[in-house]
Amino acid sequence: MQFYERAADILRRLEQRQGSIKTMTIGNQHLKPEEKRKMYALICETLKNASALTTVVQRSRVAEAEGIELRLALVLVHDLLLTKVGLQRQGANQSLNQRIRKHKAKLAAALAALKEELGAQSNGDLVPVELRDSGSTFRHVRVNLLAATVDGVVKQFQDEGYELVDSRQMERSMAHQILAPKSRKFMRDPDLHDLLVLPSGTDLHAHPLYVGGSIILQDKASCMPAHVVRPAAGSVALDACAAPGNKTSHMASLMGNSGRIFAFDMDKRRLDTLVKLTNAAKCEIITAKCTSFLDVNPLDPQYACVEYALLDPSCSGSGIVNRLDALVDTYIATVGNQGASNGRNSAGGGQEARLKSLADFQVSIILHAMRFPNVKRLSYSTCSIHAEENEAVVARILQSQDEFGLAPAGDVIPTWPRRGLETAAGLTKDQAACLVRTLPEDGTNGFFVAGFVRQKPADIEKTKQQLGAMLATTASSETANKATKNGIKGKKRRGDAVATKAAATSTQPPNKSAEHETAATDNRQQTVPLPSKKKRSCGPKGYRKRAKVSVTQQ
């Protein structure tokens, strides 16, 4: 497959949510090293300009004239009209290039007409405002403490000609001026000890430290949850919605690869990405489980020692600046693809209904994590700026249970100045001060973090009752669905009498044993353990380090 044909195929796969932009370009094993950056740039720029390019291609009718699909026409027309060098020569189908070049005058006229209609002074004005590069976010570099030291990374950058600025001697408001784009300055982050800050646009993807796993390119806001939950070395922690894995690997880094981390995600493809990323980061204590966190039994003996929980569930993503998935979302909306969907960013019947649905899900994740009997500290975070997903969720949690309270402000990134909204959801000023917010003007993505700490012992009997009710509801729903399916099949194959018998058989209760009560949910077995007589050791000796992270099916 040649260059532009492969680019069109990547667009098709993005429409079908088969992977991320970076995975399909930078991580594409079918591309030569010198082609990867070119492909990444082409895909990103084609997605940004998809609306204008689609209009130009449709008005000129070039795709129909040459018998090529829209995706292929978009990438070809992008390079023909919107780049200085024009169509690629190396690795490209030169016959196809020539066929498109003969339409250049017609395509250029269609582009000029579109710019006049929209009042665009330049090609850049054709890009939707929300997709333009703002340059407001810094390049944050998290030092992977499993492979390097902060001092060592600082020295290497200095040896390469970067100038270290003392963040202690400057006002936060001066950071954008001092770390101006394209400058060779950097600083230690004033709030997170394992983070460095470089100018916006600094490209380190080919840097030896990044390639070797010594540094992780991760936005500062995304680094806050691990610092809020603060898992101790040798302890057991969990990441409820773990993929793609940067926060999981951050916990492992802070724990010094000592202890154990359970990482849950129900998307096998995304969990495979987590395994790849955490292995590259030299993590040895992660057990990845392909399952929904809500299907995990908190009373299962294997989770008896879990003390820390990092919760970063699906959200609206309203705080993300220049996020690559926004390019894909906008592209899909432009080309009118009906087969792709994205639960994280779907409209879902209006903004209000969508936020309510997300908030309900977020509350369920937090309450489920609080059912783990030995969890003593957890973090909750979103990449959203909406109070409905942030302060309002916190208020609901505080009102619905009394085992956990907010972590003190002094334990939640105390030097960070932007705190929660005290007017939202009726939180007090002191409660709002315990919460952290970030905005793009801070040089990060928009984000929210809250910490919860246990303030009274777990009520195991109450947890059992809650789990039993949840399992009974699930089993009842599945029984009804199975009975309906069996009834339909029976009518087609054996008649109503056989269908009735099959439905009755499906309603038989599950077997019980002396050790456990079980119920089938979503083709996975949920286990509610009865009290065990044997006390489980929670010491770090019980967990051996793994050479590599692997996925297990829950």
Image (spheres, helix red, strand yellow):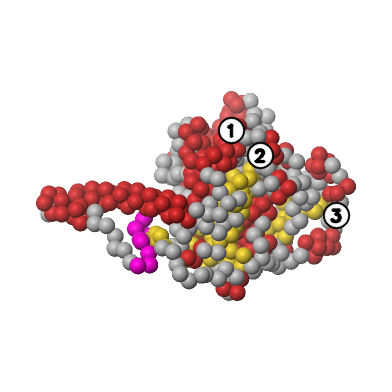
Q: Which residue is mark 3?
A: 164
Q: Residues within 10 Å of mark 1 (few under 14, many from 20)?
A: some
Q: Secondary structure at mark 1?
A: helix
What is the CA distance from the residue labelled 1 to the residue labelled 2? 11 Å
Mark closer to the chain start, 1 or 2: 1
Q: Secondary structure at mark 2?
A: helix
Residue drawn at (51%, 56%), measured in percent from left and top?
A: 372
Q: Which mark, by number, is residue 425?
A: 1
Q: Position of residue 475 (x, y in %)?
A: 32, 52
- Identify which amino acid the numbered label 1 is placed on: Ala
- Identify which amino acid the numbered label 2 is placed on: Gln
Majority secondary structure of magenta residues: strand
In the rendered view, does 518 fall on the left or right side of 166? left
Magenta segment, which residues? Answer: 514-524
Q: Is residue 305 visible?
A: yes
Position of the C terminus, as image quadrant, is bottom left
